[in-house]
Image (tube, rainbow, N blue to C red):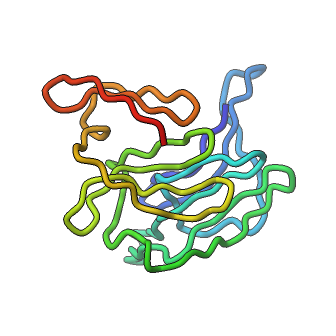
Amino acid sequence: IYSLGGYGYWHMHSNLICFDREIGSWKMIATKNKPQNYASWCVGQIGDTIISLFGEYRDESINLFTIAENGYYLNMSTLTWEELYWDKEVQPTSFLGYNASYLDLDDFIAFEYFYESYIGFFVISKKTLMISFLIRQESGVKTSPFVNTVGNTVTYQGNHRKLITFDF
């Protein structure tokens, strides 16, 4: 079991920790080129690589709060971080934060978002890293009491307790 980054002690971080079943506690895994004061809630896995997108830099002790222009990926074989660039035309225009609904599917990473006047999902292809926006008529992943993912299919409770299932 692994956990990656987040917010703690007044700053963001990209620490990778692993649960050690033998000793029954978490241990830190040393990585190279770790982005400082950076974390994202939009994280997905592609093979032996973890990608982290649409994050932020934050350290309250130095009054730092900046939305990251690029993302990062961590090669789990070498435990090395590298910066990841994308076309800024498709980047969400506001801070996404911890209340967004990120889905790590087999072939995609997706998150529900209101883009201009549309409701839908930003979808990132794990094969090409292309980012697109899928318009949906109804939102609700964020407010559903459950979200079930199998392969690239998502099932959740929509408005009026209606069960919604769709395949990316």
Q: Nearer the viewer, residue 95 or 8?
A: 95
Q: Residue at x 75, y 45 (%)?
A: 47
Quarter holding residue 25? top right
Q: Is residue 73 left or right of residue 54?
A: right
Q: Is residue 128 above or below residue 83?
A: above
In which quadrant will I find the N terminus? Answer: top right
Residue at the limit of the structure toward the left, as seen here: 160
Q: Residue at x 45, y 55 (%)?
A: 9
Q: How many marks?
A: 0
Q: Is residue 73 left or right of residue 48?
A: left
Q: Residue at x 40, y 60 (%)?
A: 133
Residue at the limit of the structure toward the right, as seen here: 78
Q: Is residue 161 above or below residue 56?
A: above
Residue 122, percent across and down?
Answer: 42, 57
Q: Residue at x 48, y 55 (%)?
A: 123
Residue 101, percent across and down?
Answer: 38, 45
Residue 131, percent across and down?
Answer: 51, 64
Q: Is residue 107 left or right of residue 156?
A: right
Residue 100, percent across and down?
Answer: 35, 50
